[in-house]
Amino acid sequence: MNPALENLEPKTLWKHFDRLASIPRASTKEAKAREYVLAQAARLGLPATSDAVGNIVIRKPAHPGRENAPMALLQGHLDMVCEKNEGTAHNFDTDPIRLVRDGDWLKADGTTLGADNGVGVAAGLAVMESTDIAHGPLEFVFTIDEETGLTGAAEFPPGILKSKYFLNLDGEEKGTICIGCSGGLNTTAHRKVTLRAPKYGVAFRIKVSGLKGGHSGVDIHQGRGNAIRILARVLQTLLNRVPMEVADIKGGSARNVIPREATAVVLVDGVKEKELKSLVATLETENRVDLGGFDPGLQIAVDSVERPAQVLDAADAVKVVDVLASLHHGVLAMSPDIPGLVQTSTNLATISVKGDEVEIGSSQRSAIESSKQSAACMVATVCRLGGFDVNHSGGYPGWKPEPTSEIVKKLQAVYQDVFGEPTRLVAMHAGLECGVIGEKYPGMQMASFGPQIVDPHSPNERVELPSVETFWTYLKAVLERI
């Protein structure tokens, strides 16, 4: 057992989390994690099947005396978001997560932790292994590639599951039951650019860093800075004030992550170096004031780099920068029905220049399908005005809340009985696999819950240790009483 996990309860859950943390499991690269889950099923003598894309279904008979209880499904996803701080030496394809215990919190050393959804998967495996939980008949579903577009859930076949209740273990707020979520859509823009030899002799890298980043759904309303947007504003100002060429722009890592860092390589005449650095310093101050306490760690650095062989044609550079500076990022509408819930948003997620092609990646979310499509149309329109070709992909449906369903009432009653206080019903401005899989199984009643996880999708990700024990206590009670 990792020293950071010693003496933690429940021991079985943390045993499996420890093993998962040692297995690289980036999205689409979950093979070793799948092998581990299938090995556990084989060790316990439980039947397991895999579908065409790699999702796993395992069944466990009821505890003696509970054979007539309704069948319930426990579900979690095997992949994790792979983000690290600059300067952190970590290869997500080969290296284990380095766990760090900090008082009542568990985090990783400079990377994402993988508590999303490692704790949920570990809980499912612990239930599989248990002999003392008086549960009814159970199904377990472990999906792949949730983080980059709910691919595993989207490809999950109909007609396999038999459960009446669907319990998703991907919740991230203690004391709540999630009963609904947003749908999502990816919007990608491509543009060819003309490359030419540079005419200016001094090259610099402008780097935006120090931002919190975070989950593009859960954290989109937090007012955090978007490194790509900030960089675009800096470049737009510089292009208007200083004779300059742009050789490269890159930033962001994934569609569902608010970009924390972005860089550009620019060239100027040597006599303009002081003016360039002075302007960047002023823009750093202005952006810090703009972000205020929402994201106080912003830094914009200017460093000398080797002179590149090619730069973007001036007209192309202006078009690309103008589009990046014009694309909206953040909340578009709040829910009129659920206080504090974001209804529609868009995330400017990635930018890259590869050869003579520029690619911009973004994602839109909404609980309302028409609003999601409208947001994607808005983003596409701005991109097309800048000469980009646009396509949409990876769409998935939302999950409509049903607060009076039988499973929700049962979950509320169990929480009240076990903890002596009511739980809160919430909906998420993020994609959960419930809606995607549930759409293929009409009538299946769904809910999601979990421990307290803070700053998922960023190297600041951490899980509150006492909340994991509470989550486990609740999960066991739910399985014994539904």
Image (tube, rainbow, N blue to C red):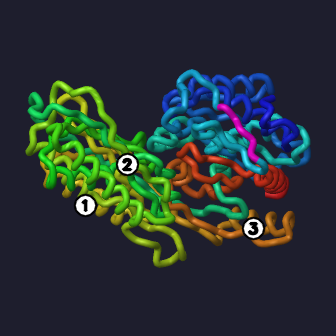
Q: Earlier in the sequence, mark 2 or mark 3?
A: 2
- Name the residue beneath numbered marker 2: 300
Task: Please tell me whether mark 2 sits on a helix, a strand or a loop.
Answer: strand
Q: Give the range drawn in magenta.
A: 98-102
- Name the residue beneath numbered marker 3: 412
Magenta includes 190? Answer: no
Kindly indicate the quadrant of the structure image that contains residue 15: top right
Kind of residue at badge 3: Gln
Task: Please tell me whether mark 1 sits on a helix, a strand or a loop.
Answer: helix
At which x and y percent is residue 312?
14, 36
Residue 315 in sight in this render: yes
Residue 479 in sight in this render: no
The chief SS type of the magenta part is strand
What quarter of the picture does the N terminus occupy?
top right
Q: Which of marks 1 and 2 is nearer the N terminus?
A: 2
Q: Which of marks 3 and 1 is nearer the N terminus?
A: 1
